[in-house]
């Protein structure tokens, strides 16, 4: 199975995603250059974390105009699977692949730490290897990670079980003290209506190796392999 | 640009050279006479600017070079010692590590965010211009007391600046230290270290060579920012310093990230022979230094340098410190290949000059020669100074004061109070408020991050090895006794690196001092460097480079002489990685390597509880230090060490507490008996900072003790851990101290967040007890 990882200028988690796929998961990984129009026949596109174009404007606002994004959007519209992580999630929202937007963390500062997340649904191609309600520990690293959307959009996400990951406290409850950035309804990850584009603000690619941060992110990648292989 | 005889005449519109203008450029009359003798004529305004930039302290090390030459710099694994952009050592498996530390103190004092950010940017460039990919940064910060609103502003701004820059480029900030002391109120210290990795054969040096090879400026365009930044860094801070804010550069980490990728691609491509950051003193120093190293001539045409605005003079183009720029010497005929790589990364490249056979450093503005210096004398002729040295009698008196007679405070009757108070000292307290703002896990190689061990551990991909990394340096010790302070800075860094399972390999140093023309300061500089040299020789850790930051003075006086040591150690296999918190899964024996003493001088206890900086700092027995490190590494390799933590700031009791509460989600109790040292004064036993001590948790205490004794190091089991326990209990004869872990953790983890949130209820022993709820 072939994963394609997009390198935007300013992406800095692209090599981490590469190693997660190639080393931890043992699947094929190829890098996709932002100026290219060729998705290289991949089965999954990863939009990685970083600061595309420096994010001096709104995060992701410029990256959505990259040549490769035209292909990624078309690919997603055909049902192709897209995993959008952190800055990739911001880019996916800017590109209209996912609803909502991101603003600065409530603390007004960058936050990097492992946080507990609850898996809200396993009925997706990205989470079928988790258990529903399972609490996993995955690092966050962002300054603009606070997810916002209109009440109607949020309700629609909830009603369709499209909130996939939620920030929770140590007891596994989505409380204010378990919300590191002030995200609406503790939302850490959502999926599009068609179920082929997942956005996740924490970094599952940083949690695939027990030596450096645990392995709770590995099941996300394994879910994709299981689904595509099936 | 062919060889020709030239005449240099003043450029129309440039100011004429007057004694006042010379003085404004920081040159003494003697230095100016030296310049005139070198040229055989009066300099032009452009030439005066060039010399001012290269002969200032920051670029020339004129007050420190003779002293730095005394440091050991060699070992079989040192591939590059001092004199390049960064030092390089071989670490096995064909891999090499480049590393360097540098200060950005003056810019950070007037503009903390950009000052700190550009400090990180500069040190990243120093490492990737060696051909190494940066894999980690460390930050060593010193501020005044957080009681001051201005200091809180500086602290918050510096932390945010460090974080935003490194986070954006995607280099994890993995370790460092933050110390608070009134000595740094007017002049904070911001030292940044970068560590990079490459294959040994990818090493490249900044040495211009190959007659006819083109010199290419790449990266950002040149603007008017930061002109004379290096000169600014070479004078005392004053009330007028704020007016020099335009000399502080503005960082662009996005361009830095592109420049990093483009530079590494250029180096790997074989199209270039040399590359150097246009850092301090910009185009001037990068071109002159590359020429001097290669012993060749160069000519630069400033009209070919891409600029941000029209009307820039040669003087401004040469001295601009605009960030994120590189100067490259390419192979002749490869200009288009170089340009193609830069274009791939959306960066510009412009040929601005050429390597020439004629032994001159020449700058032209089109056809007009605006500056010309013979050979490499611009760099090599810089004067060096050995000023008078004399110890300040007031400091000597402070050191010789008998601190054992300082009357204890009434509250100290319960040592648990003292312990809690010390844990809330911002210097000792958890720095999670800081490190949480840094991306510590990007690159997915951080095995031990901030707070989890005595040093950071970063793995080397494609190898079973890892690096142990730490910065250390106690300015208070160096103030009271500079020789000992220099020794301890190295010894403590080495001990910390050993505590995570790494063999100390080599250091980079950043020497932060006051005005060296004052005999008291030069004495400190000389003695600290001597102490560093002694420790480096004893511990087998050569110096591969570093930075000297002088003139760290403000109207409130000089900073403590503060040597910061950046240590690189090698973890042979990831199995050896050791953390500092007591293990939570099973009870373990606690063994103390080394032994307590009656020493109390220079301690955090005296500074924080008694607001007293006095007494001799603890003695540093380098043979003992080496024995402790060897014993510890031997025990770690034998697989019998569960955790290791050195006892330093705050002494043995603080170290024990840190082991108990170090993993906040899995705190571990402990019961310790120190009756073997019952004859020592209790507060020296608990809070004295005797050197050469490490707390080890082990399931096999006999093996650990044996490893120590074989190396002449005293060792003793002092207690056991209690994974289910809620207290740290310490017995000394009939004295029994019981400290609740939840209270210790509250003080330790809550201290800095409370201060920065402006919250009340900060325990501060120096202050009179006040009505409940009053603000501090």
Image: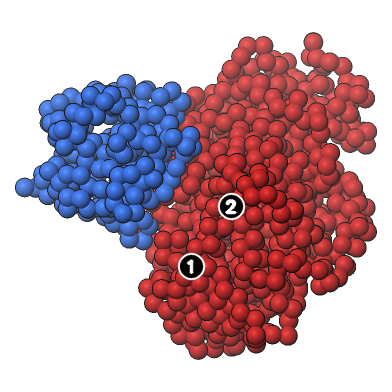
Chain colours: A blue, B red
Q: Quadrant of residue B54?
A: top right
The chain containing the residue under callout 2 comes to B
Residue on which the image places disc 1: B581
Taking the spot 36% from the left edge, 46% from the top edge, the residue there is A178
Question: Taking the image as drawn, is residue B356 in sight?
Answer: no
Q: Are marks 2 and 1 on the same chain?
A: yes
- Residue B538 horizontal/vertical position (percent): 69, 72
Q: Nearer the viewer, mark 2 or mark 1?
A: 2
Q: Quadrant of residue B308?
A: top right
In the image, residue B565 above or below residue A34? below
In the image, residue B683 above or below residue B386? below
As helix, strand or loop, the secondary structure at mark 2 comes to helix
- For this orientation, the residue located farthest to the left is A230
The chain containing the residue under callout 1 comes to B
Residue on which the image places disc 2: B751
Q: Quadrant of the C terminus of chain B?
A: top right
In the image, residue B636 above or below residue B377? below
């Amino acid at each position: 199975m072939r994963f394609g990882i997009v390198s935007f200028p300013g992406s800095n988690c692209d090599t981490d995603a590469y190693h997660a796929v190639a080393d931890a998961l043992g699947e094929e990984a190829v890098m996709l250059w932002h100026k290219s129009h060729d998705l290289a026949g991949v089965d999954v596109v990863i939009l990685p974390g970083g600061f595309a174009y420096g994010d001096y404007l709104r995060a992701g606002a410029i990256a959505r105009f990259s040549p490769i994004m035209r292909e990624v959007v078309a690919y997603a519209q055909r049902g192709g699977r897209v995993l959008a992580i952190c800055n990739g999630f911001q880019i996916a929202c800017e590109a209209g692949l996912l609803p909502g937007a991101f603003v600065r963390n409530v603390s007004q500062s960058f936050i990097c730490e492992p946080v507990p997340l609850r898996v809200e649904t396993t009925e997706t191609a990205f989470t079928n290897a988790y258990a529903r309600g399972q609490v996993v520990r995955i690092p966050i690293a962002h300054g603009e990670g606070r997810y916002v959307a209109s009440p109607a959009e949020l309700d629609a996400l909830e009603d369709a079980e499209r909130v996939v990951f939620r920030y929770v406290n140590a007891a596994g409850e989505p409380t204010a003290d378990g919300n590191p950035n002030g995200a609406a309804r503790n939302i850490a990850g959502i999926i599009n209506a068609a179920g082929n584009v997942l956005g996740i603000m924490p970094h599952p690619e940083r949690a695939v190796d027990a030596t450096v941060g645990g392995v709770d992110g590995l099941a996300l990648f394994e879910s994709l392999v299981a689904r595509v292989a099936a | 640009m062919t060889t020709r005889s030239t005449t240099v005449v003043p450029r129309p519109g440039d100011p004429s050279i007057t004694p006042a203008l010379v003085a404004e450029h920081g040159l003494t009359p003697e230095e100016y006479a030296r310049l005139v003798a070198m040229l055989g004529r009066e300099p032009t305004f452009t030439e005066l600017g060039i010399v001012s930039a290269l002969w200032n302290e920051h670029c020339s090390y004129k007050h420190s070079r003779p002293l730095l030459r005394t440091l050991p710099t060699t070992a079989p694994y040192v591939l590059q010692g001092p004199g390049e952009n960064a030092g390089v050592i071989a670490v096995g498996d064909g891999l090499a590590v480049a590393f360097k530390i540098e200060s950005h103190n003056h810019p950070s004092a007037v503009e903390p965010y950009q000052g700190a950010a550009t400090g990180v940017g500069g040190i990243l460039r120093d490492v990737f211009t060696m051909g190494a990919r940066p894999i980690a940064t460390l930050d060593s910060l010193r501020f005044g007391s957080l009681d001051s609103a201005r200091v809180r502003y500086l602290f918050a701004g510096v932390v945010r600046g460090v974080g935003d820059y490194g986070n954006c480029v995607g280099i994890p900030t993995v370790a460092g230290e933050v110390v608070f002391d009134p000595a740094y109120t007017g002049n904070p210290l911001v030292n940044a270290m970068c560590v990079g990795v490459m294959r040994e054969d990818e090493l490249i040096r900044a040495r211009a060579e190959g007659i006819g090879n083109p010199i290419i400026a790449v990266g950002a365009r040149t603007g008017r920012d930061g002109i004379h930044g290096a000169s600014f860094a070479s004078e005392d801070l004053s009330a007028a310093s704020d007016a020099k804010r335009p000399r502080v550069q503005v960082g662009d980490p996005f361009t830095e990230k592109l420049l990093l990728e483009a530079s590494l691609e250029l180096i790997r491509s074989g199209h270039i022979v040399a590359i150097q950051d246009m850092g301090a003193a910009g185009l001037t120093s990068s071109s002159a230094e590359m020429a001097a190293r290669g012993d060749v001539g160069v000519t630069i045409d400033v009209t070919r340098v891409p600029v941000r605005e029209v009307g820039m003079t040669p003087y401004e183009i040469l001295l601009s410190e605009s960030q994120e720029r590189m100067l490259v010497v390419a192979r002749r005929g490869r200009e288009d290949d170089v340009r193609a790589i830069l274009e791939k990364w959306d960066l510009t490249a412009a040929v601005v000059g050429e390597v020439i056979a004629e032994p001159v450093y020449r700058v032209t503005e089109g056809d007009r020669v605006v500056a010309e210096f013979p050979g490499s004398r611009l760099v090599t002729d810089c004067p060096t100074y050995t000023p008078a040295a004399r110890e300040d009698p007031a400091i000597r008196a402070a050191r010789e004061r008998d601190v054992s007679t300082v009357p204890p405070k009434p509250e100290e009757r319960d040592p648990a109070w003292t312990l809690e108070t010390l844990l809330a000292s911002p210097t000792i307290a958890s720095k999670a408020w800081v490190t949480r703002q840094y991306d510590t896990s990007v690159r997915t190689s951080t095995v031990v991050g901030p707070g989890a061990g005595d040093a950071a551990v970063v793995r080397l991909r494609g190898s079973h090895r890892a690096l142990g990394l730490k910065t250390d340096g106690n300015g208070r010790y160096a103030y009271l006794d500079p020789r000992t302070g220099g020794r301890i800075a190295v010894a403590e860094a080495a001990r910390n690196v050993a505590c995570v399972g790494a063999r100390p390999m080599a250091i980079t140093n950043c020497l932060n001092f006051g005005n060296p023309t004052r005999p008291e300061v030069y004495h400190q500089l000389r003695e600290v460097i001597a102490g560093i040299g002694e420790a480096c020789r004893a511990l087998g850790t050569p110096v591969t480079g570093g930075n000297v930051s002088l003139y760290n003075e403000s109207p409130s006086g000089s900073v403590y002489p503060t040597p910061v040591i950046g240590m690189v150690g090698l973890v042979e296999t990831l199995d050896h990685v050791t953390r500092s918190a007591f293990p939570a899964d099973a009870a373990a024996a606690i063994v103390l390597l080394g032994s307590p003493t009656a020493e109390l001088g220079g301690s955090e206890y005296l500074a924080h509880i008694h607001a007293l900086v006095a007494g001799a700092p603890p003695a540093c027995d380098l043979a003992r230090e080496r024995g402790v490190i060897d014993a510890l590494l031997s025990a770690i390799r034998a697989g019998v060490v569960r955790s290791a933590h050195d006892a330093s700031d705050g002494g043995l009791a603080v170290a024990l507490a840190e082991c108990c509460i170090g993993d906040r989600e899995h705190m571990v109790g402990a019961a310790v008996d120190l009756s073997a040292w019952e004859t020592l004064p209790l507060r020296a036993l608990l809070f004295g900072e005797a050197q050469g001590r490490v707390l080890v948790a082990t399931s096999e205490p006999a093996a650990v003790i044996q490893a120590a004794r074989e190396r002449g190091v005293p060792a003793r089991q002092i207690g056991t851990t209690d994974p289910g326990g809620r207290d740290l209990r310490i017995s000394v004869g009939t004295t029994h101290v019981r400290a609740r872990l939840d209270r210790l953790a509250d003080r330790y983890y809550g201290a800095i967040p409370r201060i920065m949130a402006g919250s009340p209820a900060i325990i501060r022993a120096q202050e009179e007890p006040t009505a409940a709820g009053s603000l501090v």
